[in-house]
Image: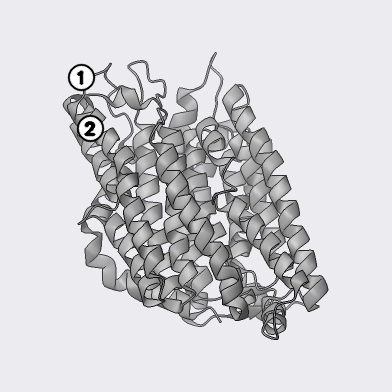
Amino acid sequence: MFDTPSLLMTLPEMVLAGTGLILLMIAAYVGDGSARLLGWLSVAALALAGWSLCPAWMQGGEAFGGLYRADAFAAFAKMLIYAAAAVCILVAPRFFEAGATDGARAIRAEYPVLILFSCVGMGLMVSAGDMLTLYVGLEMQSLSAYILASFMRQDGRSAEAGLKYFVLGALASGILLYGVSLLYGFTGSTSYAGISAALADGLSQGELFGLVFVLTGLAFKISAVPFHMWTPDVYEGAPTPVTAFFASAPKVAAIGLTVRVAMEAMGSAVQSWQQIVIFVALASILFGAVAAIGQTNIKRLLAYSSINNVGFALIGLAAGTAEGVAAVMSYLTIYVVMTIGSFLCVLQMRDRDGRPVEDIASLAGLSQSRKGLAAAIAIFMFSLAGIPPLMGFWAKFLVFDAAVAAGLTGLAVFGIAASVVGAFYYLKIIKTIYFDEPADGYAPAASRLESALIALTASLIVVGYFFNAALDSASAMAAAALH
């Protein structure tokens, strides 16, 4: 007999999974000529899935005996995931078709389908109330991501990115699963509630090892130091729309999953994991800032920037409070806007023949030939550096404020100091754009959609303070849903 209430709670995943299967059959019969149509249908499915989140946002509840949770926290994360995924689907056709050779169509019909299936996995990740649900969602997202990373089959860099991602991802999944098995063996439960109740009685050595292995596996998924090694190579080698997707939607899902596991499954052992999170946050902030300085490829630089930003987000988690969780959710929202905007600008980097360019030196003198694009890049770089009055400053302020309120003043001071170091490589890009001798010019803007999305994201970074009240309220509701 069907569990109707549970099925209704999982409606977003059912919509995406069902649409993905239907589109897969269409692609099999029609072929790659249907890629653009399937892309728009996928975006419509993401919009429908987003609309179906309304009951979870307002009421919340558990499905299938606590395996799945439909609450404000999951709804918040899914809205960010679906929005980022939709943008990455819409901007992909132009990029792939520009790379087509010998009349071949580089965009293939399975691209939007893979993103839909990845979104199903990410939805399960942020809604998981049990370690088994967590693992199933994580693997579903990862399997789609491995294929997306190597999507350009004729490109050696893309194939290398997919292989590296697969090998290291499989290793991290094994470590995570081993940690889950240890927690199950020593606590007798795989549910977050059961694990939390067992840990409340005191942490045994076996439980501590399980906790460490689980956090290690999750650290890989969020590209946190010292488990970041795959990120620069995968971001550089993957197609740019795929890189934009990796840097936004899966990042939100993985950090959201980490927050839920830490606060719900391990909430009764905050003192045990807090020091681990603090170390990982500090290492990610410092390494991401220093390693980015010498980069010459814009996608590798943004990869190290994402590692740096993960560190700042983890400062909010290290606080171990509802205010810290709310700060993390606000940070993720602003981070997604900044990251999507930055990669949209990278998509505009094309030489006179229309071929993609990724060298930072090619940006020299851009302010003279593409004033609008130069201004947008400057806005995103200043915001990523955390310079007021842009929204990137507000994101960092929220996590620092939560850390200070939790008594982690030293952590906040270190984060502020590291922000100054990290600003160097962002300002280097702006210097190249506005003060270096002009390089070979870029091709004129050819996509109204990309230009409109760049204008929208840049505007949100500038005037986003007008939406602070709504963002703070939504973040607080999401944080309050964790228990």
**What amino acid is found at the position of numbered circle 2 in the picture?**
Lys
Closer-to-camera residue (324/242): 324
- Mark sitting earlier along the chain (2/1): 2
306 over 131 or under it: above or below: above
Q: Position of residue 403 (x, y in %)?
A: 39, 70
Place residue 233 in its image quadrant. top right
Residue at (44% x, 38% y) in the render: 291
Residue 280 visible in image: yes
Q: Total of numbered circles in the picture?
A: 2
Q: Position of residue 364 (x, y in %)?
A: 26, 24
Location of mark 2 (residue): 431
Give neighbour class at mark 2: few <14, some 14-19, many 20+ (Cα, 10 Å).
Answer: some
Give neighbour class at mark 1: few <14, some 14-19, many 20+ (Cα, 10 Å).
Answer: few
336 over 13 or under it: above or below: above
Colour scheme used in the picture?
one colour
Quarter of the image that includes the N terminus: bottom right
Place residue 298 in its image quadrant. top left
**What amino acid is found at the position of numbered circle 1 in the picture?**
Glu
Place residue 109 in its image quadrant. top right
Q: Farthest residue toward the top?
A: 102
Callout 2: SS: helix
Residue 87 visible in image: no
Residue at (36% x, 42% y) in the render: 342
Q: Is residue 109 left or right of residue 420?
A: right
**Residue 211: image tag:** none
Q: Position of residue 163 (x, y in %)?
A: 67, 34
Q: Position of residue 426 (x, y in %)?
A: 31, 40
Location of mark 1 (residue): 437
Q: Is residue 159 left or right of residue 481?
A: right
